[in-house]
Image (cartoon, grey):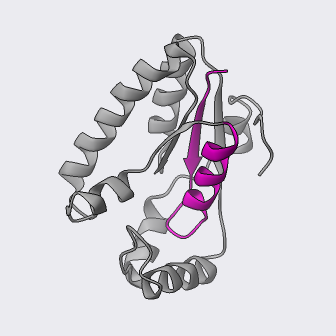
Amino acid sequence: MSRLILLCGLPGAGKTTLARRLAAALPAVRLSPDEWLADLGIDLFDEATRARLERRFWALTQELLPLGQPVVLESGFWTRAERDELRLGARALGVPVELHYLTAPVDELARRIAARTAAGEPAAVPISRERLDGYLRHFQAPTAEELALFDPPVMPR
């Protein structure tokens, strides 16, 4: 059954871990900009290229969903506006949309980021505490009201 699954959260929140599990269990196509950028040898902080890649992922998602293919997008979706745009776009295709919001205390996020960087995980890049603190200032966490706009998950976390 077709459905769009959005994974929302800051770096280190567990998006990739959950995305892999969901994609394997459903099965679903999983699209991760960090992994694609790393595989292509592109700086993960190249925002212009990231934006182009995410637009391409959305175009591909709009091709896959009407074919009955579930899609997991793990871009973080830091703003309400981008989450609304994808939710409404998928609903226009007649597709249910899930939002999984993953969070952890900032010290835990920093610990996880350092651990995955030290382990040399694919697409892992060092993120300083200062940069992470900056991300926190820009991140718009989903409210209970917003979460209620999405469909319930077909699989628990």
User: In the picture shown, does residue 110 fall above or below 7?
Assistant: below
- Magenta includes 7? yes
Classify residue 24 as left or right of residue 136: right
Could you tell me if residue 96 is visible in this image? yes
Q: Residue at x 55, y 27 (%)?
A: 87
Image position, residue 41 (x, y; %): 20, 63
- Along the line of sight, the residue nearer the viewer: 157 or 23: 23
- Along the line of sight, the residue nearer the viewer: 4 or 141: 4
Q: Residue at x 70, y 43 (%)?
A: 25
User: In the picture shown, does residue 16 fall above or below 28?
Assistant: below
Q: Over which residues does the magenta segment extend?
A: 1-26
- Magenta includes 121? no
Q: Residue at x 54, y 70 (%)?
A: 12
Image position, residue 147 (x, y; %): 70, 38
Image quadrant holding the N terminus, namely top right
User: In the picture shown, does residue 52 fall above or below 132?
Assistant: above
Could you tell me if residue 76 is visible in this image? no
Quadrant for residue 132, please give it: bottom left
Image position, residue 30 (x, y; %): 50, 43
Classify residue 141 as left or right of residue 124: right
Q: Residue at x 42, y 50 (%)?
A: 32
Quadrant for residue 125, please give it: bottom left
